[in-house]
Amino acid sequence: MRNTCVVLDFETTGLSPGVDRAIEVAAVLVEDGEIKDRFQSLMNPGRKVSYFIESYTGISNGMLASAPPNERAIKELVSFVGKWPLVAHNASFDRRFLDYEVARAGCELRSEMACSMLVARRIYEEPSNHQLKTLVEYKEIEIAGDFHRALADAEMTAHLWVKMKEDLELKYGLSEATFDFMYRFGRAKKGGLEQFVRGYSP
């Protein structure tokens, strides 16, 4: 199924894997434009989170105390993702934490990851920025919960991904904007998008 993917989001103690750790992960399975399944888990990294991170995410040290260790949660995530490609908003951030936590857990996940932010930057010029919250408001996507909680962010990113797929199909007259098309579109030069679309072949 060329349009099946898993949309992923991490909440973390900071920006640098190794120095920082993941404290929540969520993923939603998107098939034919609809969310078909969900996975979410808090993750106990074995350290305290700062007051800033607690206030930013709403995830407290008390909540993490009873959460599964990162290694167990990541193994469950890997099982959920299976063979499907991944999507994340600002994917380079999530990819770094995913790779670090997967390696630390002693498992493997090589799924390709597309970036919804890169795609949005190429098709939406009007928003003042391309943060998830801004794009959710711009595309009038229903707010699924609190921003900076993994499941809510993953669900809203999934809806954004589907909206962008539809907008790309309409703009370029495509019969189907597949995951591969969108992955490569997000990496194409902004000044050469028309050329990319004309020359694209799976």
Image (cartoon, grey):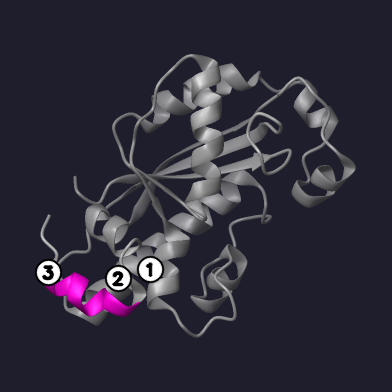
Amino acid on which disc 1 is placed: Lys
Which residue does the image show at 43% across and 69% down from the upper left?
120
Cβ–Cβ under 8 Å for marks 2 and 1 = yes
How far across and how far down the image is residue 161, in percent?
A: 39, 61
Look at the image and say whether residue 73 sits in the magenta stretch. no
Residue 108 vs 158, above or below: the answer is: above
Secondary structure at numbered mark 3:
helix
Q: Are marks 2 and 3 in contact (CB under 8 Å)?
A: no
Horizontal placement of 202 versus 94: left or right? left
**Disc 1 marks which residue?**
163
**Along the horizontal axis of the image, is 33 left or right of 92?**
left
Between the C-alphas of marks 2 and 1, the distance is 5 Å
Q: Note whether 177 is above or below 39 in the view shown.
A: below
Which residue is pictured at 45% across the width and 72% down the height? 121
Q: Is residue 197 magenta?
A: yes
| Residue 132 placement: quadrant | bottom right
Earlier sequence position, callout 1 versus callout 3:
1
What segment carries the magenta color? Answer: 191-199
Q: Which amino acid, by three-letter code, is at mark 2?
A: Glu
Q: Does 103 sit left or right of 190 as displayed?
A: right
**Residue drawn 55% across and 26% down?**
101
- The residue carrying mark 3 is 199
Q: Which mark is residue 166?
A: 2
Is residue 44 positioned above or below 143 on the image? above
State the quadrant of the C terminus. bottom left
